[in-house]
Amino acid sequence: MRNSYVPPRGSPSARIAIVGEQPGYTEIRWRPPTPFVGAAGEVLNSCLQLAGIARQECWLTNVIKDLDRPLAAYINIDGDNSTITANGQEYINQLRDELTQLKPNIAVALGNVALLALCSRTGITKWRGSILESTLVHGLKVIPSFHPATVIPPKSNYINKPLITFDLKRALKESEFPEIRRLTRNIEIAPSFEKAIATLKWLYQRGLEGNILDFDIEVINEELDCFAFAWSPYEAMCIPLRYQGDYFSVEQELEIMRWVAAILEDSRIAIRGANIIFDLQFMMKKYGICTHGEIHCTQIAQKILTPDYPAGLDFVTTTHTDIPYYKQDGKKWIKMGVGSWETWWTYNGMDTIATADAHPKQITDLESQGNIEVYNRQRKIIPPLLYMATRGIRVDVQGIINQKERETLECEQLTEQFKSIVGYDINPNSPQQIADYFYKKLGHTPYKKRTAKGWVVTTDVDAIKRLARKGIEAARILLRLRKLSKRIGTYLNIKKIDSDGRYRSSYKPVGAETGRISSGETIFGTGGNQQNWPHDLLQYFLFDEGYIGYSFDLSQAENRIVAYVGGIVQMIEAFEKGIDLHRLTAALIFNKALEDISDEEGSSDLGDGTHSERFWGKKGNHSLNYDFGYKSFALKYETSESESKWIVEQYHRAYPGVRQNYHAMVINLLRTTRTLENCYGRARFFMGPIIPNPPSVPAVACHQTYKEAYAQIPQSTVADKINEDGIEYIYYNQDPLFHPIEQLTQIHDSIVFQIPISIPWIDHARVLTLIKQSLEKTIYWHSSPIPIPADLTIGVNMFKDQSKELKSKYFPSDIDQLAQNLATYYDELKRR
């Protein structure tokens, strides 16, 4: 006899069955015991109400119906290695009999346990929202969704609630009929050479007629394995290039690729895909095929629509189509070779079907959201990003090698010093050995972090920072060791440099929720994230021989937007008087005269004593505008909590308008509309918890929503300005003056490009003036102007300390004078 059995409850005629995992204590104590009456039940009730479903008309049950033992004693979820005990199987059999007798039109599987029981699958994040056929009850439709318990502590994934509601709305529609109804899709695979060529020719003509063509490639071992085109949400063709050996002859493959090039390179043909920049970068790098037509991307569209959620094709598919999650089979093929060639080719074709079906619906949603112009502007950045990814940046390879040797030697010396302090041989890279030393031998309270499997002891960088703050020398040395190891393995790794001595990255046009781009490793394993390169190592990024390099940087742009949007008088006055805000903030923090603030390293004894006074003003501006707490500030910048608390208090005493005006305005907008719109019309709807919050939502979760919201307007405005008034302005400019410009990268608030010195200096001056004018175009907040200056850096490498900086206010208005200055600067730089 089970002591805590909770039977199912609900209407015997229910068309919707809701299946959970295991009852909680509240469900057991309820009289009579009833599923979903605790905190998770409150979330479910709210979602049901939002979805238009009456709880009393549903059947509510759990897979495991008692709490005698932990869930893992019945079913242990571990991906493909999940296990079911005899007692667990007994309950699954009971669920089968229960649902067979009930005969609902659809079952909602809440969580991984219900998904495994009903459909023999795991991975709720991937499968949620799909309409599946049950493997447990013949003919039963199942829609997986997140368990409502994920919304409440300790998981507190509040943004799961809208997805649960979305899935319940889909369940309501599906409850009208018992069978699975899907659109008929036709994916032709393994065509003959003649059929492939005929289809490509037909697609070319169809593209010329104004139809968007959906395109997707599959790459294995850096080689194109197959590719697909779709011409409607129902029809596609996958053309393989490999089948145990080559699928076509060399001559046939050449002819096929010529037609692919004709389609992709024709400026009159629009191409669409998921993360399409990846496919197009590969085609450019591998085959020299450069896309010139209009480009559409479902990932860009989704990241603008719902920045809080993933933007991959799996999420897009479950959100905008009736296609169930299908990528599992394709991914198994890639990783383990499981399945048939036909499965692999169908997977490729389905990717194009999915984008063809989803994208028009995304466009409709973007129009309703008021973000269609934002989408059209954001996708325009793909071609210049492709150019930068292909062009790459010249690297001083020998300089990198020499720097690596110096830092490797320092690593070895620090390792010996670390072992000497510890007193025995220890591996600094072993988490277990490090934990044993600090937590067992030295007796410090172990630091823990939350993972998917619960709280675990950690020796991550935050833990070591906390130990170093206590004055533990071994922790301080270990921090330095880890920083050096990161530099050596990530930035001084010559394997990341291509064979032609250039550093190339893959760019993502939707790298962040704010619209900022990001960069990372290429498909060929080279390059990396250029946004985070250490400042001093930029000296090894060289402009090409015969070129001079330029960088325009938006001067304290985020600070200016916060100041003007929030009406923060002290900041506005500083900007309008030309005062360096970081220096002013430092003066206010340290209670010193502006002219007495030092920017020399080591001039402040805060933290580890290596930073300048201006440094702390700068970090205060960058963090405290967005409501960093003193503990977070202390951890990030390695200060004591008492020092950090003092900085935070001084900052907000100096700038009361940050909280009283700017933060208050953002909070009010979230409470009234949950939507913030930046200076370029980009609107973002925030799905996280906000105050006033229900008791089940912790205050810290609300605080995270606000922190993201405080950053949204300034960061997204700067991203749009850099993208549109900088990168896109240069790339799409038809003035012949712009033709010699080679854009190289975009980092934070700056754009980097080079111009041949064979071009007359007067032309350099003219084009630089035009770019500066574009970047300095006034933006507006509710008709109030916000001026943002653009400073110019001139150099032979990307390290500002070895370059010439020309502040906006000193930029000559006379073109001839600027040309003379540029020639002089170049001569000086070459002599260094």
Image (cartoon, rainbow, N blue to C red):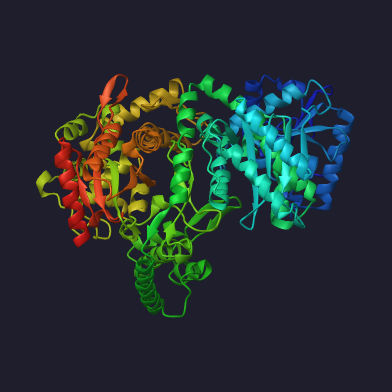
Q: Quadrant of the N terminus?
A: top right
Image coordinates for residue 41, horizontal then vertical, percent: 66, 31
> Where 509 falls versus 210 (above or below)?
below
> Where 800 falls versus 554 (above or below)?
below
> Is 192 on the left or on the right of 430, as rendered?
right
> Where 685 falls versus 606 (above or below)?
above
Residue lying at 28% horizontally and 47% vertically, measured from the top left: 550
Image coordinates for residue 503, horizontal then vertical, percent: 43, 57
Residue lying at 43% horizontally and 51% vertically, measured from the top left: 391
Residue lying at 44% horizontally and 65% vertically, measured from the top left: 493
Closer-to-camera residue (265/281)? 265
Residue lying at 61% horizontally and 33% vertically, measured from the top left: 39
Image coordinates for residue 794, horizontal then vertical, percent: 24, 49
Closer-to-camera residue (611/181)? 181
> Is 414 on the left or on the right of 821, as rendered?
right
Q: How many marks?
A: 0
> Is 223 on the left or on the right of 187, as rendered?
left
> Is 746 on the left or on the right of 330, as rendered?
left
Q: Quadrant of the C terminus?
A: bottom left
Closer-to-camera residue (335/56)? 335
Is residue 153 something that shows in the picture?
A: no
> Where 397 falls versus 366 (above or below)?
below
Closer-to-camera residue (492/213)? 213
